[in-house]
Amino acid sequence: MMHNTQTNAVPSMIDNSIPHHQEFLRDVLHGLSQPQKTLPCKYFYDERGSQLFEAICSTPEYYITRTEIDILKRYMADIAAIVGSHCDILEFGSGAGIKIRLLLDGLTDPRSYIPIDISMEILEASARELAQQFPSVQVIPIVGDYHKDIQLPDAFRRQTPQRKLVFFPGSTISNFTRPEAQTFLQRIRRLLTEGDGLLIGVDCIKETEILNAAYNDAAGVTAAFNLNLLHRIKNTFSTNLKPQHFFHHAYFNAREARIEMHLVSKLDQIVEVEKTRFSLRKGETIHTENSYKYALPVFASMAQQAGFTTGKVWQDPGHLFSLHYLTAH
């Protein structure tokens, strides 16, 4: 698509993050004190974790990224026709910005792009590159945790005849529990006015073998990604935690229709974090992530309950993944 050529400099980073160290510690101590120990998956994404996730996306077993990219390429003309011209785009968890490049290039004269990500380093680099590649688009990066309410800039909150579009690719919605996903969709709906859109990627239920392989790649990249969370805790706090005393375990829980990722203790051990002690038995797990898989009618029902009209759904030929366009009503 053609874009006008006015120059655009990256504005100052908007920092909506809260005192990160204190919240991180609070979440670690709370999670490790539960009967089923947990650690929030949002803390995967320090600089090393973000690099490892980008590497996961290139593994042959992890179909999600390449399949969604193929869908975007295949159906971009349809997406552009629905979205219209001069839209303002908000993306949650933008990361390295690979998919947004396809969207910005394929849409007709998008006006602004507001990426929100918890990783300042990744966000800053991506925003700079996008501003250079798309000089007519106003890029307004925001550092923040999109799980919480974030003050959005005027570029997205202002009332205009043009459509606002929330872009939420990668089936990141899958990391929420079903009730959390429902609440998050409702939060997105409150950001939009009638007629605005949500373009969201959703992973589909499929053969267990494909799912298990995607989260247990032969090269061990996903295992390193999961274990990196322990390295991050070790490098951030006063702790005797030894990541080598744990191993990665991921499997498809068919009853819950979700992949579960765990860190399994190799031995009976006492872990101390900032003078708080936790005991783990050999074989006990720390639950680090869920990735729910959806049948199309189930996700459509959730979207409708959140205040959206379901529209186009695009899928790959193998029906591994789905991309949904939802309209706020």
Image (tube, rainbow, N blue to C red):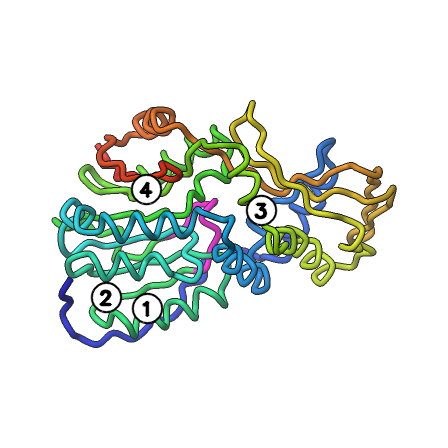
Check disc 1 and report the residue beneath it.
130
**187 in the magenta segment:** no
Check disc 3 and report the residue beneath it.
41
Q: Mark 1 is on which residue type? A: Leu
Highlighted range, magenta = 143-151
Q: Mark 3 is on which residue type? A: Cys
Residue shown at 57% from the left, 33% from the top: 252
Distance (Cα) linking label 2 and label 4: 30 Å
Q: 112 or 100, which is in the foreground?
A: 100
User: Mark 3 or mark 2, which has the lower sequence index?
Assistant: 3
User: Mark 3 or mark 1, which has the lower sequence index?
Assistant: 3
Q: Which secondary structure lies at badge 3?
A: helix
Question: Would you say 315 lies left or right of 147 here?
Answer: left
Give the image location of residue 68, x and y in percent.
36, 48
Give the image location of residue 244, x and y in percent.
78, 55
SS majority, magenta: loop
Whether residues under marks 2 and 1 lie with C-beta atoms below 8 angstroms apart, the answer is: yes
Check disc 4 and report the residue beneath it.
316
Q: Which secondary structure lies at badge 2?
A: loop
